Amino acid sequence: MAQSRREWMRNGLLASGAALVPMGPWLQAREARGGRPAQGRRRMAFRFRPYTLQLKHVFTVAVSSRTTTPVMLTEVEYDGVVGFGEASMPPYLGESHETAAAFLSKVDLGPFANPLELETILAAVDALAPGNPAAKASVDIALHDLAGKLMGQPWYNIWGYDPARAPLTTFTIGIDTPEVVRQKTREAAEFKVLKIKLGRDTDKAMVEAIRSVTDKPLTGDANQGWTDRQQALDMIGWLKERGFEYVEQPLAKERVDDLAWITERSPIPIIGDEGVQRLADVRKAHGVYSGINIKLMKSTGMREAHRMLELARALGMKVMIGCMTETSCAISAAAQLSPMADWADLDGALLISNDVFDGATVVDGKVRIPDRPGIGAIRKAVTG
Ligand code: MG
C-alpha cells in the first residue's frame, strides 16, 4: 500500500477515505522542485511552550474546583509548513507543565524523513514513556495538522466523514448555587442541549433550578460522584423524567460490575468517561457502558481517538466526542471526528477568555468544522 500511495502522490492524487482528492500545495511545490524537499529543511522540527488558560467562571465538578487550566502549545514544522498541537492538563488528571515539558523534551522528530508516516512516528512517541496522554496528544495533533496541510485536506475529508453531519454540542453547566446555575443557563441560549455536572447532594436542586428557566434537552455527568448503585439508578430514572438524554460515569470507574448493573437497568444510555481512556479500554467497556466519551487528551490524540470511534461503532456502542478546557486548537482537532459521533461536548474553548486560536465554532448549537486543511485551526494575530 505504501508504494501505491507514493504512486498516487507522483500522479498528483492522494487517496482519502472518501475519494481521490487533488494533492496539497506542499506536494505541488515539491513536484516543482523535482520531487525532493529543499536542501537543509527536510527535517521535522518540534517546539513547545507552556500557556495558562483563564476560565470565564470558576469550574466545579464532583471532585474539584478551579479558575485556570495549564496547557502546552506545540508546533511541528516541515519544509516551511507548521502544524499546531495542544496538551490540556486539568490538575486532577495528574499532568502538568512540568511533566509535559519533561516528556516533550524527549521528542525528536528529526530522524523521521516522511511526516506522513503517522503510524511509525506516533508509535515511537507513545513508546518514549508510559502515561503522559495529553503530552502525547499535543504531538499527535500537531503532526495530524501538519500532515493534513501537506495533503491539502481537512481530516474529516481524509477519514471520509461528512462535516454537515456534525452533531449538536452540549454546553456544560458546572456545580453551583441555584442563582448562578439559572444565570449560566440563560447565558447558554444559543445551545440546544445542556450538560449538567452532577455527583453531589445538590443534584436535584441544580436540576430544578435549570428546569425553572429552560425546557431544553439535558444530559448529566456525575464524574464518579455517586456511591450507591440503587440510589444512582433511582436518580437516573428521576433525571429521565426531567428530559435527560444520557448520564456519564455514575459511579467510580473501578466498580465495573455495579456500572454494568446500572447500564442493564437504566432507561437512558450510560456513557463511560473516566473509565475509558485509550483504545484497549473500548472492548472492556462493551457491556459495562452503553457508550464511550472519547477525548483527545485521554486517547493520546487523533490517531487513537479515530480507532476508538470506529471500534465502538463496530461493537454497537454510542459515541460521544468530549474535551477538557482547551483552546480552539485541540477543539478543532476533536471536531474532525464529530460527524461520526452521536453527541458532541466540544464547548471547551467557549469556557476560556484567552483563546489563541480560531477554529471550530458552534453555530445554531451545532459544531461547525472549518473548511481548512489539517485540523482547521489558525493562530490569532496576538498571542499571550
Ligand atoms: Mg465526563
Image: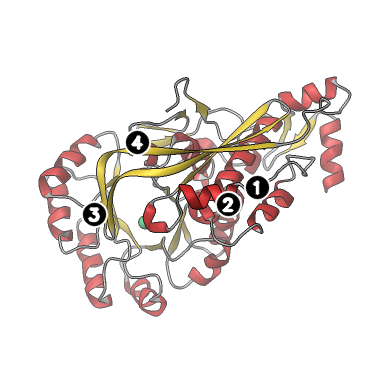
Query: Disc 2 to disc 3, how far (Cα)?
Result: 44 Å
Q: CA distance from mark 1 to mark 3?
A: 47 Å
Query: CA separation, marks 4 and 3?
Result: 24 Å
Name the residue tied to disc 2. 103
Q: Quadrant of ligand 1?
A: bottom left
Mark 2 neighbour density, 10 Å: few (under 14) some (14–19) many (20 or more): some
Camera-side mark, 4 or 3: 4
Q: Secondary structure at mark 3?
A: loop
Quadrant assignment, res 76: top right
Residue 131 image offset from top left, x and y in percent? 54, 60
Disc marking residue 243: 3
Residue 226 shown left or right of residue 253 in the figure: left
Q: Which mark is residue 350?
A: 4
User: What amino acid is found at the position of numbered circle 2 in the picture?
Assistant: Phe
Chain-order first, disc 1 or disc 4 = 1
Q: Nearer the viewer, mark 1 or mark 4?
A: 1
Q: Position of residue 84 (x, y in %)?
A: 57, 35
